[in-house]
Image (cartoon, rainbow, N blue to C red):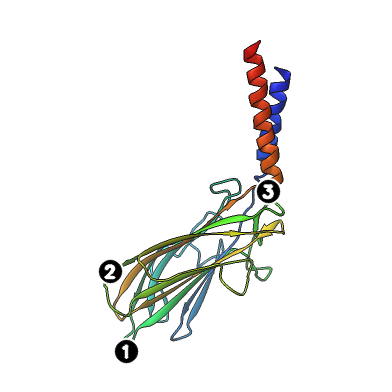
Amino acid sequence: MKKLGFVVVALVLLIGGMISPADATFRIVLTDVNTAATLTIWDQVAPSDKAAAAGSIATGGTIQVGNFALSVTSDSYYPGTGPLGAELTDTSISTKNKSVKGAADTLRIQVFSDAVAGPSLSPNPTTFSAPGGSPLLLDNALAISFMTNKPANKVTFRSWLDGQVAPIVTLPTAGYGETSVLASRLNPTFSLWNELDITLATGSTASVTGTTTVSGVPEPASLLLLGSGLLGLGGLTWRRNRK
């Protein structure tokens, strides 16, 4: 019975070692591509962020960025689902192109978890943490709802890992899209950067959600130890039942 208890404790410690808490201070950058008007909102920095909780940004109502009237709610949290778990999402983005010239315009929404900021801008400049050497499984999804369907309306979602030059995934307009990418990691931390380009004809309105959810994939050695522990546990149970 003592051996059985030891194996159970060892398994708990092994699995627990894959999970470590972290916070991710993040920011949203909103840009009207045609007019170059821009607005940056930092997590927990007044007056732009109306959300009191860390890891959540909300404008608290309609704001104006160039030709666009919009409201934004975004979340960046850890832990999420899976052995590691983290999520960077821009949700409930309601935006309307109010251009008076009648031309289509593009709103670019960038959501960063890397917290690169001046000392006074970011109260907790950290990134997501990850077990050293473990690959990450990144699930990327895009959901779109156009209130007014016009040929000019389109949305593109892109996601970057650790500021790489090329995005790890690009999802074009499709109403809904989802893809998974497995990325190897060598460092104990990682950052995410999601970007939505929302092009709307004048008077069009859209609600868009772009999400990257991250799960840790155990290293082969960890999987081997976990498998050996489970086999040992099964063997002890079998021997005990025979007796």
- Residue visible at 65% across and 47% down? 218
Tell me, yes or no, whether the two marked residues, 1 and 2, touch with CB atoms within 8 Å.
no
Expressed as whole percent of the image width and height from the top left, the position of residue 76 reads 54, 57
Mark 1 or mark 2: whose residue is earlier in sequence: 1
Tell me, yes or no, whether the two marked residues, 3 and 2, touch with CB atoms within 8 Å.
no
Q: Amino acid at mark 1?
A: Lys
Q: CA distance from mark 1 to mark 2?
A: 20 Å
Please determine whether, in this image, residue 222 is positioned above or below residue 7: below
Pointer 2 residue: 147
Quadrant assignment for the C terminus = top right
Q: CA distance from mark 3 to mark 2?
A: 45 Å
Mark 1 or mark 3: whose residue is earlier in sequence: 1
Q: Between residues 6 and 60, which one lies in front from this camera angle?
A: 6
Q: Amino acid at mark 2?
A: Met
- Residue visible at 66% across and 15% down? 240
The mark closer to the camera, 1 or 3, is 3
Expressed as whole percent of the image width and height from the top left, the position of residue 4 reads 69, 22
Q: Amino acid at mark 3?
A: Glu
Looking at the rendered structure, the secondary structure element under dot 3 is: loop
Mark 3 or mark 2: whose residue is earlier in sequence: 2
- Residue visible at 66% across and 46% down? 20
Pointer 3 residue: 219
Is residue 78 rendered to the left or right of residue 235?
A: left
- Residue visible at 36% across and 68% down? 174
Asked if residue 177 shows in the view, the reply is: yes
Mark 3 surroundings: few (<14), some (14-19) or many (≥20) residues within 10 A: some
Q: Which mark is residue 101?
A: 1
The mark closer to the camera, 3 or 2, is 3
